[in-house]
Image (cartoon, rainbow, N blue to C red):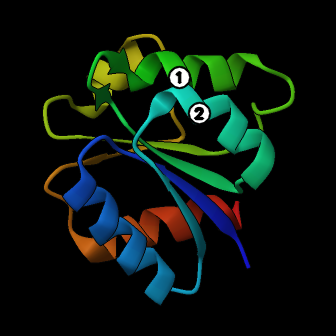
Amino acid sequence: MKKILVVDDNEEILEVIELILKLEGYDISGLMDVSHFSKRINEFKPDLILLDVMLGAFDGRDLCNLLKSDQSTLHIPVIMISASHNLNDSKGNVCSPNDFIAKPFDVNNLINKINAQLAA
């Protein structure tokens, strides 16, 4: 079973995404408190990370950049999600995610993008 780490500071969105992905047969770990980000990655060992851009005082693009600059995590696909940014903002800023999903998102689009990254 493929593992997906979902990082979002909005509890309702996190719960919806977790439910959708569990129904798709994925092993899901949700995270709202990004101070535990590195620890959760080391313990859970996700196959993919779904990462919100705006995480309260944190910027998800900074976390993405950390992942992509670390030899032990650069292989993990990162899909950024955001209601206030677009793909060009995310790719042009700090990080180059593997993909981007705008909020509100279409469930089928979310699943298709995740499946595509995990099949690559």
> Which image quarter holds the C terminus?
bottom right
Q: Which residue is disc 1 drawn over?
A: 63
Of discs 2 and 1, which sits in the foreground?
2
- Residue 47 percent location from the top left of the image: 71, 57
Give the side of residue 87 with respect to residue 51, left or right. Answer: left
Q: Residue furthest right?
A: 72
Q: Residue at x 45, y 76 (%)?
A: 21
Disc 2 and disc 1: Cα gap in Å?
8 Å
- Residue 50 percent location from the top left of the image: 47, 49
Q: Residue at x 33, y 30 (%)?
A: 53
Query: Is residue 45 visible to us here?
Result: no
Exactly how many numbered labels are in the figure? 2
Is the residue 19 above or below the residue 109 in the image?
A: below
Is the residue 48 above or below the residue 74 in the image?
A: below
Query: Is residue 83 visible to us here?
Result: yes
Using a 10 Å C-alpha cutoff, classify the residue at mark 2 as few (fewer than 14 neighbours), some (14 to 19) or many (20 or more). Answer: some
Circle nearer the N terminus (2, 1): 2
- Residue 18 percent location from the top left of the image: 41, 69
CB of mark 2 within 8 Å of CB of mark 1?
A: yes
Is the residue 84 above or below the residue 11 in the image?
A: above
Is the residue 33 above or below the residue 95 in the image?
A: below
> Which image quarter holds the N terminus?
bottom right
- Helix, strand or loop for disc 2: helix
- Residue 39 percent location from the top left of the image: 71, 35
Please tell me which residue lies in front, 66 or 118.
Answer: 66
Q: Residue at x 48, y 30 (%)?
A: 34
**Residue 4 figure quarter:** bottom right
- Helix, strand or loop for disc 1: helix
Q: Which residue is disc 2 drawn over?
A: 37
Q: Amino acid at mark 1?
A: Leu
